[in-house]
Image (spheres, rainbow, N blue to C red):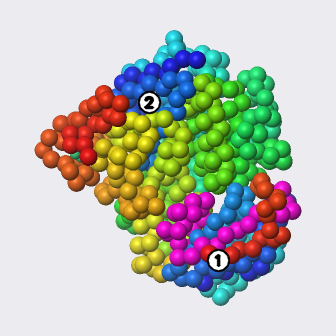
Amino acid sequence: MVNLEIDRLSVRFALPGATVNAVSDVSLRIRPGECVALVGESGCGKTVLASALLGFLPGNAETRGSARLGDTELLTATDHELATHVRGRQIGLIPQSPASHLTPVRTARSQLEEAARVLQGDADVAAQRTGLKPEHLDRYPHELSGGMAQRVANALALVGEPWLLIADEPTTGLDRELVDGLLDEFRRMVDDGRAVLLITHDLAAAQRIADRIAVMYAGRIVEIGPAAGVLGDARHPYSRGLVDALPDRAFRPIPGRPPLLTNLPDGCAFAPRCDQATAICEERPVLTDDPHAVACHQPC
Amino acid sequence: MLTAQHVTAGYRDPVITDVSLSVRPGQTVGLAGPSGSGKSTLARVLALLHKPFRGVVSIDGEAVTKFRFGALQRTRIGVLFQQPRLSVDPRFTLRRAIAEPLRGNQERVEELADAVMLTADLLDRRPHEVSDGQLQRACLARALALRPRYLICDEMTTMLDASTTAALVGVIRAYQEETGAGVLAISHDSTLLGRWADETVRLQPHPVSGTGQRDLADAPTRNSPTTS
Ligand SMILES: Nc1ncnc2c1ncn2[C@@H]1O[C@H](COP(=O)(O)OP(=O)(O)OP(=O)(O)O)[C@@H](O)[C@H]1O
Ligand code: SF4
Ligand SMILES: [Mg+2]
């Protein structure tokens, strides 16, 4: 098992007349035996970051920086290399909106069994680990409820026993009991020396199993540190706002609008929404390098 | 009032049996229940997208006879699904998706996009060029476009961050205040429903069909929505 080392990764999309800065200068190391959660407002770049690591970016994307998995440079690896050595074997991906990734004309079982054959895994074990019953497996995708489709996607990602699992909103449509079961499963993988990158909007889930939490805003990591510290004692005004928006807190949205990724300010991207902004915020704050790091000129 | 009376519905086998539920104008009813208990099926029946085996759905006192996408009565009900990727034509820009029910009223498109906080740069992109949360905001704008009297939100916020969730719930509340619309909010998240809904109804898993039940021992003998 090896580290995943993401170093100053940026992803831009070229659109007619505009460039979308979806991910900017993200550095992150994930070690075996570690679960890192990635949280942040919708559209902040979480899924694009995950897609970049697996070579799933569309043709109009341009990447910079590096992402190394052991000796493999993921950003420049060929599709063939990724398909035969990385995807499903070393890095498993649970995609967001799984129902749109399942093959409509084949039952869940045939898709899972094929993946098991290719990756030399065990379909029954994977199904059981994700809370699927044999009768669910005989259904076609359109016959699955949202929560069942999610479990099928989870089983497909686990069947190859990857050492790193990237799970993009894996609890969508699952009730509390199934969520807890899945999180326990992730925790077991981590305790077993594997690694999990959990992309989630569910801060309670992140707090329960993540060792570290990274908060992303407008494509940048603005805060990263031990799970309890980031949620319990947030240092970035944006992270504070996110925690306060929870229904068991103030249930108050962060004021203002999400940032325009086609036209980001030179300074702190959160400044237009930040009630602590002052003149120095016109300069871009850099992420500190302490264990609970923050990118803000006036952390809380 | 939007009501379901003694509705039994499903696919090959029934998923919900003898369920009754109503949503008054201006009210927000939460619908909770474990995975597979038939919440989405009930949502589809109430949205007139799925014909029940038995029972009656009525809108403001008028019984529904046609359960089809094109049915006239459907325009009185707006729906939002858990997975926006499955409900938007991938060839349409967000602008066109929102405008579709409006027959091109551009001014209203801008107004709706503004209400759901979709910035101008996103409106000219296609679904695969925006995030799931951004697409869900477009779906909310589209659902509100025809000024529905009832809005059914099936796990609308399940993949949205806390701030976007709170913001969209705020948009729906403002719409209700303005129009007196009734809302059915379906979610697994009881904390969210506690905060959002005026009252919450709980659906229990169906004991005989294999649909989505994990725990037969705990299941009651039939669906019994109880108001909490
Ligand atoms: N193919 C594309 N072309 C142009 N822009 C894109 C493309 N794909 C994504 N984007 C933009 O990149 C940004 C990041 O998108 P991403 O899907 O990573 O968000 P996310 O953080 O996963 O959001 P969510 O929580 O809603 O899933 C968004 O602003 C989105 O509109
Ligand atoms: S750098 Fe300034 S504007 Fe940005 S979050 Fe910190 S205080 Fe607010
Ligand atoms: Mg995403």
Q: Residue A255 placed where, x, y %?
A: 31, 58
Magenta stretch: includes residue B187 = yes
Is A128 positioned to the left or the right of B190 in the image? right
Residue under label 2, please give it: A61
* Residue situated furthest top in the rendering: A71
Residue drawn where x is 65% and y is 38% of the image = A185
Q: Residue A220 placed where, x, y %?
A: 35, 36
The amino acid pointed to by label 2 is Ala
Callout 2: 10 Å neighbours few (<14), some, many (20+)? some
Q: Secondary structure at mark 1?
A: strand
Q: Give the image quarter of residue A16.
A: top left
The amino acid pointed to by label 1 is Thr
Q: Are the residues tagged 1 and 2 within 8 Å (C-beta)?
A: no
Callout 1: 10 Å neighbours few (<14), some, many (20+)? few
In this rendered view, identify the residue nearer to me: A54 or A180: A180
Q: Secondary structure at mark 2?
A: strand
Q: Residue B64 placed where, x, y %?
A: 71, 80
User: Magenta segment range?
Assistant: B183-211
Q: Chain of mark 1?
A: B
Magenta stretch: includes residue A235 = no
Q: Residue A159 placed where, x, y %?
A: 72, 30
Is A170 positioned to the left or the right of A258 in the image? right
In this rendering, the answer to whether A46 lies above or below B78 is above
Residue under label 1, please give it: B227
How far apart, in angstroms, are the residues tagged by discs 1 and 2? 50 Å
Depth check, mark 1 against mark 2: the one in front is 1
Residue drawn where x is 42% and y is 36% of the image = A226
Determine whether the beta carbon of the residue marked 2 sits less than 8 angstroms from the nearest atom of ligand 1: yes
